[in-house]
Every structure is written in C-alpha cells, then in structure tokens.
Image (spheres, rainbow, N blue to C red):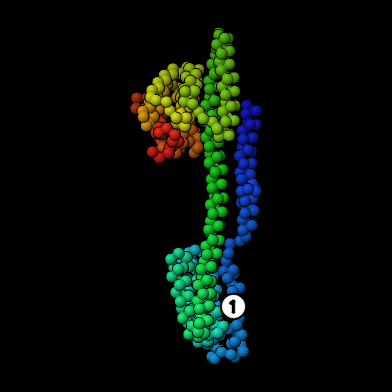
Amino acid sequence: MTGTRGRLRGMSCRLDAWQLARQSDPADAAGAGERSERMGPPPTGFTLLPWLLMGLGSLANIFQGNDSNPWIGGAGLFVFNSLYIYVAFRSFDKELRESPSTRLALAAMALVTCGLALAYGGSWLLFFPLLGLAAGAALRGRWLGRWGWSLAVAAGVVAGVKDGWNGLNIAYGTFLSTMVTAAILSLSDAVRQLRAAREELATRAVAEERLRFSRDLHDLLGHTLSVIVVKSEAARRLAPRDLDAALTQITDIESVGRQALTEVREAVTGYREGSLGTELDRARSALSAADVDPVVRRSGPPLPPQAEALLGWVVREAVTNVVRHSGASRCEIAVAGSGDRVRLTVTDNGAGTALSAQGPGTGLTGLRERLATAGGSLTAGAEPRGGFSVTAELPVPAEGKPVGAPA
C-alpha cells in the first residue's frame, strides 16, 4: 500500500507538472503570465490623447489673433476637446461604447467640427481626421461603415468649400483615420479574446484531465480494494480447514494487485481501454469470493472497444456496490445488444442500500456523466420486489464512428 500511495502522489505531481509545462512551454507562447506581460495592459483612452496635438495649429492661431472671434474659436476648441476625451475614454468599454450618450457625443463632435471648419478653415480642417479617429474607436459593425463614408463626404464638402480641391486630402485622411483606428482596435480586441480563450481551454483541459483521473482512480481502486478485502476474508476463513483453497485465494489477491498496478499506470497515461468480457470474468470471481451467486448472460453482436470500455466500468462499479453494500446472495448481470443499442443490467436480491460515492466524478454519478457524454444513460434504484438494480443503455455507433458521434 505504501508503494501504491507513493505512485498516486507521483501521478498528482505529474498532472501539476503537465499544467505548468503547458504554461511554460516556449512553443505555447511561454506561459500565461509571460503572454499577458508581453501583450502589455489593454489600451485605454490615453492611447488616443496624443492625437489632440493636431489642434495646436488652431490654438496658435487663436493666441496670435489670426482668427476672427477668438473667443468663439476658443470655446469651440474647448468643446471639441472635451467631447473627444469623453468619447475616447468610453470607447474601450463595450457597454459604454454602445450607449446612446456616446453616439450623441460623437454626433455633437461632428456638428462642432463642421461649424469650426466652415467658420475658420485652414488648420481647423484637421479636426476632421481627429473626428474620424474618435469615430473609429467608438463604432463597430454596420455603424462604422455608415459613419466612415458620411464623415469622409462631409469633410470633403466642407474642406472643398474652404480649400478647393485640396479638400480631397482632408476627406481621404478622415476616412483613413476612421477605418485604420477601427481596424487596429478591433484586431487588438480579437487577439486578446483569442488569448483569453486559449488560456481558458488550457485550464479546462487540465480540469477535464483531473476529472478523468479522479474517476479512473475511484473506479479502479474502489473495485480492486473491495476484491482484495473479500478474498482476504475468504482466505482467512478457509485457512484453518482448507489450506489449498486459502492459497488459491491468496494467489488471486496477488494477481488482482498486480493487475491493479498495471491499470493505474494505464489510467495515468489515459490509454486504458477496458474489456467487458474481462470485467465480467472478474465480476464472477469477486462475487463468488463474497459468497454471492453470480449469473451472467450476454447476447447480441460484438461491441466496439469504446462501448465495451464504458460498460466494463459500469459492471465494475455495480459489482463493487453489490459486494460492499448489498448483503445479497445472488447477482444477475445481463448484457443484451441489438443493431444500434446495447443494454446492461446488474440486479441483486440484497437490501438495496445506498449507492457508493455520490460526489461529482465518482461512483455511479461519474458513470452517469460518462454515459451521458457518449449519448447513453444510467439509472439505479431499488427494485419493487426487493434488491437493487443498475441499468445502463448505450448507442452502438456504425463501424468507424466513435461512441457518442452523430449518426
């Protein structure tokens, strides 16, 4: 038992090491922490603030008195910058970005930009590309295309009125700033979402592996230790009067122990494929050693390996419950298969006591989850005439298809 516990601790360490290896493997982006560090913090509204320097030319004109009505120009500049900052900082939160107040602020920016450009022209026309940058940050989907073209046309018309054919450059710059900003920010969001999904998938893979490991250990060791206990008791009872029979039981204990070690190693690597025939033979032996009369019936065509493995787990768990909990004198195991479905029933005439482990991932609860994943079902309960019954049904896929695959 000491060696077995040491191996189990080693298995857990291997799983932890495997999880760490997934995170630290250079081919896998060098770990979740390093990936996040390399990407840096997510963009915020501060990313867009430096572009406000494009308005320095207009500010200089106000201070130099080159524009008429400088107070109106200054007020317009203040309103534009305030709206720009408001939209910029709301653009990096999905809920705030899609709120009506953000769209309203963007529309107000468009009106202020057109008014200032028509009133002053010159360097004030550069506010159109700034407006496009804010629109590209705040808009997604169908709204982006509509605003992009609308702003480009408005910028071209206003700039054309103030600056002739040079207005085409302003129109092109407005459209380009809108689309490039939207593309860069959308790509950044997509990359972060993909990395987050990748890390989530890795976490789920580890959780699923731990769950598989927990189920296999419970089903393997629970059954094996029950058989060892039963056969040890039988050997103790037989030793005073029939030494040869007791030695036979001891030999069986050794064989069961060796087989258990092999199965545990296979369970760790995930390569164990149970055999229904082997489990039925073991069930006969375990039931006989526990003074339970075994009756096994099997009919139907051969089953694919995956179906055999699942039903083998059911036989193992159900028989373990009979030996440990039922106090039965007879146990009947029936396997009936048809062309597309197989049914396994394990019935005893015992007291019908509680199921074994009820926690998630163990006992009949874990088997129910396994069969449900493969498209099957498992029911268990007391029989009306006494005793306890476990019934498992499983679809038999066409040749070449895995269990649980769509027909």
Q: Quadrant of residue 141?
A: bottom left
18, 214: nearer the viewer: 18
Q: Position of residue 262 (x, y in %)?
A: 59, 27
Q: Position of residue 176 (x, y in %)?
A: 52, 71
Residue at (61, 37) in percent of width and height: 12
- Whether residue 104 is visible, yes or no, is no
Given the current orientation, which residue lies at the most extreme left position? 384
Please state if 85 lies on the left or on the right of 146 as rendered. right
Please state if 265 lies on the left or on the right of 294 as rendered. right
Residue at (48, 36) in percent of width and height: 366
Q: Position of residue 382 (x, y in %)?
A: 38, 29
The residue to which callout 1 is attached is 54
In the picture, which quadrant includes the N terminus?
top right
- Whether residue 399 is visible, yes or no, is yes
- Please, what is the three-letter code of the amino acid marked with disc 1? Met
Q: Position of residue 245 (x, y in %)?
A: 55, 11
